[in-house]
Image (cartoon, helix red, strand yellow):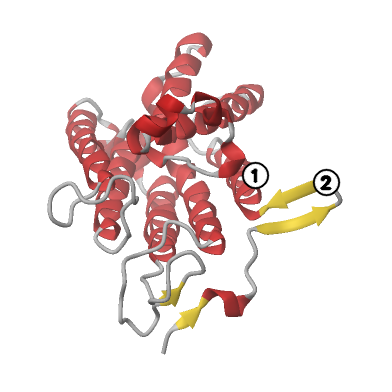
């Protein structure tokens, strides 16, 4: 038994009133950022996440810019540089789609560095705060990808395979839902449990390192089920651009984990 996405009447447009069009993808960004902000506010009540409410609001504002600008430029540079080299004005047309998580991560990382320096906030506790909230946005973003029928998986005969409107007549892995479950729900649960119920939160950098490791590993796993971008295809056998971008995340996560363990006594307090 296969599922045809057209049977579910899923429309990328959530609401249309005259010339005003609201897409599910935009709502996913809004939900991820808003709920991430509120979750960070909740975490701030737990030591050692120390930040003034106004600083958190500033962080939300600049993190939003970092996600959008970094995500778009990441897509341009990582996934389709030749096309955008000859069509530079289309870089600004974000409503046509094309965002990269890895680019968004770099954008938010840059924002974190600036905020940490200008507001005199310790960097690693700040990145731990962001890492704990990031899976919320990942979850909603992947659900929006599924509704849009984009970033679908490879052809599959699995009983839960889906026929996507833009994916041809053959059923495919709903890889967006795999990512929503692993990168979103599972990672959020893991980091949340560690932040609220263990001493890990006192070891600056641990949550960040675990986010990098877990996201890089689970995304690399799902890449074996996800259809590669047509303009890139496979690099080597079954390996894609997603695999290539996840590798430095995993390496950075391992290095940061070792560094955090060696330079913190928080776990022994």
| Tag 1 and tag 2, C-beta contact below 8 Å | no
Q: Which residue is mark 1?
A: 30
> Local crowd at mark 2 within 10 Å, few (<14), some, or many (≥20)?
few
Percent across and percent down for residue 120 are 48, 12
Q: Is residue 211 left or right of residue 142?
A: left
Residue sitting farthest toward the left? 237
Percent across and percent down for residue 55 are 61, 22
Q: Which residue is mark 2?
A: 19
Residue sitting farthest toward the right? 18
User: For the residue labelled by badge 1, is the local secondary structure a helix, a strand or a loop?
Assistant: helix
Q: Please state, as top left, top right, bottom left or bottom right, where the N terminus lies in the image.
A: bottom left
Residue drawn where x is 41% and y is 25% of the image: 85
**Residue 266 in sight in this render:** yes
Quarter of the image for residue 151 reads bottom left
Percent across and percent down for residue 16 are 79, 55
Quarter of the image for residue 195 reads top left
Q: Is residue 1 left or right of residue 256?
A: right
- Taking 167 as reference, is 25 above or below it? above
């Amino acid at each position: 038994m296969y599922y045809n996405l057209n049977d579910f009447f899923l429309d990328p447009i959530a609401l249309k009133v005259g010339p005003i069009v609201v897409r599910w993808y935009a709502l996913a960004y809004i939900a991820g950022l808003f709920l991430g902000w509120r979750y960070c506010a909740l975490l701030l009540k737990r030591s050692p996440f120390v930040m003034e409410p106004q600083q958190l609001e500033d962080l939300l504002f600049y993190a939003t810019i970092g996600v959008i600008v970094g995500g778009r430029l990441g897509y341009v540079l990582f996934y389709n540089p030749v096309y955008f080299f000859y069509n530079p004005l289309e870089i600004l047309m974000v409503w046509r789609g094309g965002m990269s998580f890895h680019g968004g991560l770099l954008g938010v990382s840059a924002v974190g560095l600036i905020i940490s320096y200008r507001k005199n906030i310790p960097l690693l506790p700040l990145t731990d705060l962001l890492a704990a909230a990031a899976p919320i946005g990942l979850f909603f973003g992947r659900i929006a990808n599924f509704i849009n029928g984009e970033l679908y998986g490879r052809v599959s005969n699995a009983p839960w395979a889906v026929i996507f409107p833009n994916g041809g007549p053959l059923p495919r892995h709903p890889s967006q839902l795999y990512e929503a479950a692993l990168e979103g729900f599972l990672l959020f649960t893991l980091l949340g449990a560690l932040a609220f119920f263990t001493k890990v939160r006192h070891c600056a950098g641990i949550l960040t390192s675990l986010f990098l490791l877990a996201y890089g590993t689970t995304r690399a796993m799902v890449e074996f089920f996800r259809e590669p971008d047509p303009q890139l295809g496979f690099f080597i056998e079954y390996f894609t651009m997603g695999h290539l971008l996840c590798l430095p995340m995993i390496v950075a996560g391992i290095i940061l984990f070792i560094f955090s363990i060696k330079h913190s006594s928080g776990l022994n307090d």
